[in-house]
Image: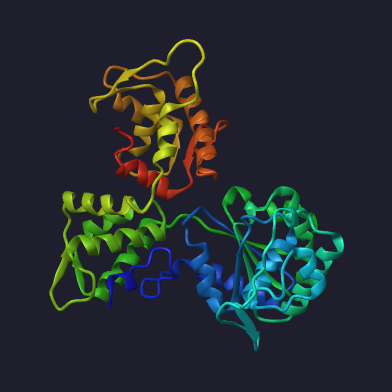
Amino acid sequence: MKATEVFTPGKFPVHTFVDDHLQDKKQQLLDTLDAGAMLISISGPSKSGKTVFIEECLGRTSLIQVTGAGVNAPSDLWMRVFDIIGTEIPNSIARSSGASGTVGGKGAVEGNALVVKGKGEVSASRTNSESETLSASHASDCLQLLIKELGGTDLVVFIDDFHYVPANVQIELAHQIKEAIRNGVRFVCASVPYHADDVIRSNPDLRGRVLSIDFEYWGTETLKKIAYKGFAELGVGYRQSAIDNLASEAAGSPQLMQYLCLNACYEMGLREKSETEFELLSDPQIHENICRRTVQSTDYGSVVELMKEGPRTRGSDRNVYVTRFGWNGDVYRLLVKALSVDPSQLTFRYNALNQRILGICPTGGPSGSSITSACAHSAKIVNDAAGSRIVEWDGEHDVFDIRDPYFLFYLRWSDAADS
């Protein structure tokens, strides 16, 4: 057995799946789907295991997984569904949508199960002019075809990243989802926490018809179980402190923990199960090597550089401070460095962040107002550059929150905070 079959970042973890902390959520999900007439809304931070949870609960062959990214009309989403299940598209819909012939042919519904097949001979295509808002009759035709294909079946439409759908399109999509649910189509929507209620706000009539399941980042004790299971599968021994260190770096993300464990195998020279005894030692250099390998799986270089530059200044230059690391920097560089130092942490209240910055500057640091202003500007810079909301500054409560554990990991291990 290969190490890549045991530790599987980005794929379903067959050998290292951990769900004992999710049993209540799983039962809620299954009971609600069994009762029918309810939308399941899953919300949680990036890389917190939402998709793996849904796949394990419902089975991948029962899921029709589509994304809200790039959806400019509800029918865009339904055409993706038809593409996956291999639906024959009536001529009236094909003409309006720009599809020629049938759509997709990737799968078929057989006995209420999704059977994945090879791609069909003809695929949907659409020019820019054909991507304009479709007519009401076309939208209705797509909805009715969706209901005809999936109503009363065991298949579930899993809409990932619902929050990527434009707000004006969410309104019509939510109304169509309500109608489809009323006719026996089953839905799960996944989004990040600060967009958890988008589907309800888009159609208040859904209130009372939505089961909300909230995810949080995993605790370190739960993350460690990934390592325990995987290393046992590969016959690897370990020092407990080595596992503790990996779990602390994973920042609550099971996916990042999978990466760290896989790279620990590579660092030991283990690529498949062997008769030779391997042991993961608790050694600072080994730990650093593992993290340096892992940071190569993500790149926020341009984002961090913009964060360090801060907004363009008007008038006088910013104050520059001496650091204990041998370089001088303004409040924006200090903020980046403060987020990266030990211990690994996703959420920072002002007092704790201020103490970190003061610890960086032996001869005095920036004022409190300068720090809070830098937090507010940095959050906007980072989110605009990344194209998603990966950090957040709560000015009312003075809390800086990193919502993507990979961003924190990059800050800690890429050298970007010191360059």
Residue 221 visible here: no
Position of the N terminus by quadrant? bottom left
Query: Is the image coloured rainbow, by chain, by secondary structure, or in one colour?
Result: rainbow
Left or right of residue 354, residue 117 in this image: right
| 293, above or below 91, in the image | above
- Residue 73 x %, y %: 74, 57
The residue positioned 39% from the left and 15% from the top of the image is 319
Residue at 75% x, 49% y is: 168
Q: Is residue 114 above or below residue 322?
A: below
The residue at the far left in this view is 276
Q: How many marks?
A: 0
**215 lies left or right of 68:** left
Q: Can residue 367 be spotted in the picture?
A: yes
Judged left or right of residue 309, residue 155 is right
Compared with 415, 208 (above or below) is below
- Please state which of residues 90 and 372 is positioned toward the viewer in this rendering: 90
Residue 181: quarter of image: bottom right
Residue 138 screen position, x and y as percent: 82, 65
- Outermost residue, bottom side: 111
The percent position of residue 301, horizontal first and vertical second, equals 39, 40
Specify the quadrant of the image occupied by residue 78: bottom right
Residue 362 at x, y = what percent? Answer: 26, 21
